[in-house]
């Protein structure tokens, strides 16, 4: 390749079409050709990052190794590409304005009136190019959050317009929706109007990817081609699939990689993704039965709030060639009706979260799992509540709690991290990012990680109170891992070998090609539990939600 290539993916008509999945799929195909690809995401909101956003509004907050709290699309990128990204792949409106104003305050623009054009657009172009330089990328793939026509991303699109004329190898991709009023009647007019809007902003899409209710007809393709000034060979189907991991093959079979490579000046546009396809086949057509896994949470009506947990289950299940039926159980429902609704699950997960609502329901789910030998995995808050439950029901401290939820408890088994006690600002101030833990030889954690030192990502303010660790160990709660830096309890296990909790978020590092060891533990134990209980029929064959907020 003679020079670096740039690809931009723009949304049109409406949000929620899956730009992140299309971006990750294109990156995957180029990566499969041996190219070094780095994604970059722009989000127009004025938050510096998404760390303080409510999951009900924005979905999951994804955490990178460097502690950056970023958009959930970064989880999609990492899961597809099996790489770890850093903060420079994420630009928000708040971050770029903060960056520009800081430079103005430092006197970097003395004598000039600082404007959107050229100062802000120049900063954005410099950021994009710098990311390519520092990662030595062959191709930078840029996802523009939101929809073309939004005020929030208009200045970023202007920067992309300038970039498209300054760089020799540039490809613009329009993601659009082609609805059908009735079967066999796809409507292309919304796409035509959206394309005109994009072109009015100075960007001419080279490729149009169409989300649709049914496969595009040849007539529809020709209409889009005619009105959008692209070849019919540059119009691609993006159908609804049983798994998002199938999209790279779908696009590759239509020849999208060949078109992109021609535009970027790269020879041989076919990508060999046969290994990826074999894993996807295990997801679609598993050979070894199925298991029912419950995620007991408090944001269960928002499907994106626990997306990394759900995908980590899918990754682990693919390794065992089983179908995971994933159930989202609203924890307040357990508070109202009791934990007996958990009796038919083969495995239970309690993930992270904030706030007092639903906490007692999570604790009851953990108790039920422990007392009934149901495989259990506690993540972050899930591990903390695992400790609270053990303190209440094994050690007999009925008032035991976390000071996050009960400041006057006589047994504060979970307490604020010492360094958090002087923190006043909320954004980016938790214990964040990758941290190393030392595991105890012979424990389940050691067995499944097959290592004595492990690195996982964190996002928390509270820890297991070290004053109570000896009491727990005397009552057979296994402390199987501690922080290398400060001795914080990172892993604990039930003595029956069926429950593990971790202060970390291992779901953030799980990938289809490299599943999280702790999710492998849960799925393997769930398979064993299903066989042990001889349950022949499944409760579900899809992701379902029980209860509501």
Image (tube, grey):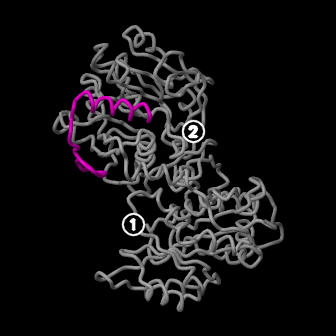
Q: Are marks 1 and 2 in contact (CB under 8 Å)?
A: no
As for residue 219 lying within the magenta part, the answer is no
Crowd class of label 1 (few under 14; some 14 to 19; many from 20; radius 10 Å): few
Crowd class of label 2 (few under 14; some 14 to 19; many from 20; radius 10 Å): many
Please tell me which residue lies in front, 144 or 50. 144
Q: Which residue is mark 1?
A: 240
| Residue 150 seen anywhere in this rendered image of the structure | no
Q: Is residue 461 above or below residue 37?
A: above
Please tell me which residue lies in front, 510 or 332. 510
Q: Is residue 354 above or below residue 247?
A: above
Q: Quadrant of the N terminus?
A: bottom right
Task: Measuring from the top left, give residue 6's x and y in whole percent.
Answer: 69, 68
Task: Measuring from the top left, give residue 440's x and y in whole percent.
Answer: 53, 17
Q: Earlier in the sequence, mark 1 or mark 2?
A: 1
Q: Residue at x 40, y 54 (%)?
A: 304
Question: Helix, strand, or loop for circle 2?
Answer: strand
108 left or right of 198? right
Q: Which residue is mark 2?
A: 432
As for residue 520 lying within the magenta part, the answer is yes
In the image, which residues are magenta?
519-548
């Amino acid at each position: 390749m003679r020079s670096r290539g740039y690809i931009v993916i723009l949304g049109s008509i409406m949000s929620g079409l899956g730009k992140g999945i299309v971006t990750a799929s294109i990156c995957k195909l180029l990566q499969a050709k041996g190219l070094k690809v780095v994604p970059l995401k722009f989000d127009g909101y004025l938050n510096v990052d998404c760390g303080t956003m409510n999951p009900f509004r924005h979905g999951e907050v994804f955490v990178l190794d460097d502690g950056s709290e970023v958009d959930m699309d970064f989880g999609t990128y990492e899961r597809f590409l099996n790489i770890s990204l850093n903060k420079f792949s994420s630009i928000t409106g708040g971050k770029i304005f903060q960056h520009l104003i800081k430079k103005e305050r430092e006197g970097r623009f003395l004598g000039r009136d600082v404007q959107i054009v050229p100062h802000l657009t120049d900063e954005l172009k410099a950021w994009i190019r710098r990311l390519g330089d520092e990662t030595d990328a062959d191709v930078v793939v840029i996802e523009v959050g939101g929809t073309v026509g939004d005020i929030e991303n208009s200045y970023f699109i202007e920067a992309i317009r300038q970039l498209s004329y300054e760089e020799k190898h540039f490809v613009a991709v329009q993601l659009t929706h082609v609805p059908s009023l009735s079967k066999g009647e796809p409507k292309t007019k919304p796409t035509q109007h959206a394309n005109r809007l994009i072109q009015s902003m100075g960007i001419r899409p080279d490729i149009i990817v169409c989300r649709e209710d049914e496969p595009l007809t040849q007539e529809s393709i020709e209409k889009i081609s005619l009105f959008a000034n692209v070849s019919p060979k540059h119009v691609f189907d993006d159908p609804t699939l049983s798994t998002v991991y199938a999209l790279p093959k779908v696009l590759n079979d239509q020849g999208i990689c060949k078109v992109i490579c021609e535009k970027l000046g790269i020879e041989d546009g076919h990508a060999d993704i046969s290994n990826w396809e074999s894993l996807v086949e295990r997801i679609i057509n598993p050979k070894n039965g199925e298991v029912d896994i419950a995620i007991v949470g408090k944001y269960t009506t928002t499907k994106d709030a626990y997306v990394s947990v759900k995908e980590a289950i899918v990754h682990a299940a693919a390794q065992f060639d089983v179908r995971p039926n994933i159930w989202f159980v609203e924890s307040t429902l357990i508070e109202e009706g009791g934990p007996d609704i958990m009796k038919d699950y083969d495995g239970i997960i309690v993930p992270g979260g904030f706030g007092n609502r639903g906490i007692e329901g999570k604790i009851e789910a953990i108790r039920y799992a422990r007392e009934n030998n149901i495989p259990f995995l506690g993540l972050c808050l899930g591990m903390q509540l695992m400790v609270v439950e053990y303190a209440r029901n094994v050690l007999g401290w009925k008032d035991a709690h976390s000071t996050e939820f009960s400041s006057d408890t006589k047994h504060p088994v979970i307490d604020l991290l010492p360094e958090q006690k002087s923190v006043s600002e909320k954004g980016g101030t938790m214990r964040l990012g990758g941290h190393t833990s030392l595991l105890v030889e012979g424990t389940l954690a050691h067995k499944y990680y097959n290592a004595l030192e492990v690195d996982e990502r964190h996002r928390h303010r509270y820890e297991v109170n070290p004053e109570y660790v000896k009491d727990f160990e005397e009552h057979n709660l296994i402390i199987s891992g501690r922080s290398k830096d400060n001795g914080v309890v990172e892993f604990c296990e039930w003595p029956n070998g069926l429950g593990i909790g971790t202060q970390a978020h291992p779901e953030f590092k799980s990938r289809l090609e490299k599943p999280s060891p702790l999710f492998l533990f849960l799925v393997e134990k769930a398979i064993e539990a299903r066989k042990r209980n001889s349950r022949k029929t499944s409760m579900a064959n899809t992701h379902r939600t029980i209860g509501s907020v």
